[in-house]
Image: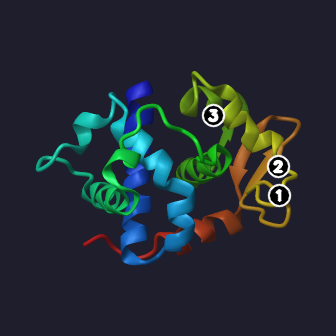
């Protein structure tokens, strides 16, 4: 189950990086939101082997990672255990939205087990912060719905359209 989570996460970053390279995602926003988490994810000992060239299948992720290394400088990008500046709430909102696009709904308990078995509070923040103006659960954004009675998260039609808009087109 944990390996499946890491593979899903690698695929998630590959899709995001493809959108970044193709200009489907705002580059300034992407850099602010993902540069640190992308670095931490790739340099994690569990994932490192999957990004080794020339055999990696995650070519878009590697391309963006290298670009960020050039922008930030080699010593800045390779800091060990650096999570400063990462917006975990935004990361998990995006990750959960993509996951819900594939499965439609999931319980809050299950999503904690899938996405953050060692840090359940990070996923729980997706639900707890639903009244924040930037939350995907906020009624003004309305990409994800939370059923208070069942504890289920589900993607809205607006959320599905947002994912389709972000990732339209084919990989080349």
Q: Which labelled disc corresponds to residue 98?
A: none
For the residues bearing labels 1 and 3, Cβ distance under 8 angstroms: no
Residue at the image point whose x is 88% and y is 36% from the top: 149
Identify the residue under disc 1: 138
Assign a secondary structure to mark 3.
helix
For the residues bearing labels 2 and 1, Cβ distance under 8 angstroms: yes
Assign a secondary structure to mark 1.
loop
Q: Is residue 35 left or right of residue 22?
A: right
Identify the residue under disc 2: 130
Q: Report x, y in % for residue 108.
A: 72, 33
Residue 136: in sight, yes or no?
yes
Q: Which callout, 2 or 3, points to the residue nearer the camera?
A: 2
Q: Which labelled disc corresponds to residue 111?
A: 3
Q: Is residue 165 above or below residue 64?
A: below
Picture quarter with the C terminus: bottom left
Residue 29's quadrant in the figure?
bottom right
In terms of sequence position, does the residue under pointer 1 or pointer 3 come before the other?
3
Residue at the image point whose x is 56% and y is 60% from the top: 32
For the residues labelled 1 and 3, the Cα–Cα distance comes to: 19 Å
Please tell me how crowded label 1 is: few (under 14), some (14-19), or many (20+) other residues with Cα within 10 Å: some
Assign a secondary structure to mark 2.
loop
Q: Report x, y in % for residue 138.
A: 83, 57
Please tell me how crowded label 3 is: few (under 14), some (14-19), or many (20+) other residues with Cα within 10 Å: some
User: Residue reaching furthest left?
Assistant: 54
For the residues labelled 2 and 1, the Cα–Cα distance comes to: 5 Å
Q: Report x, y in % for residue 46.
A: 34, 28
Q: Is residue 62 left or right of residue 106?
A: left
For the residues bearing labels 2 and 3, Cβ distance under 8 angstroms: no
Residue 8: in sight, yes or no?
no
């Amino acid at each position: 189950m944990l390996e499946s989570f890491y593979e899903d996460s690698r695929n998630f970053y590959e899709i995001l990086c493809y959108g970044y390279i193709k200009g489907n995602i705002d580059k300034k926003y992407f850099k602010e939101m993902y540069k640190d988490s992308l670095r931490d994810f790739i340099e994690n000992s569990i994932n490192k082997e999957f990004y080794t060239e020339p055999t990696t299948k995650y070519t878009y992720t590697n391309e963006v990672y290298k670009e960020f290394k050039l922008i930030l400088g080699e010593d800045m990008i390779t800091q060990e255990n650096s999570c400063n500046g990462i917006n975990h709430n935004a990361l998990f909102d995006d990750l959960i939205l993509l996951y819900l696009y594939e499965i439609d709904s999931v319980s809050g308990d299950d999503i904690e087990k899938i996405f953050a078995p060692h840090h359940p509070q990070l996923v729980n923040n997706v639900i707890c912060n639903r009244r924040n103006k930037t939350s995907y659960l906020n009624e003004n954004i309305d990409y994800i719905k939370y059923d208070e009675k069942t504890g289920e998260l589900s993607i809205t039609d607006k959320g599905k359209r947002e994912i389709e808009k972000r990732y339209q087109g084919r990989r080349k």
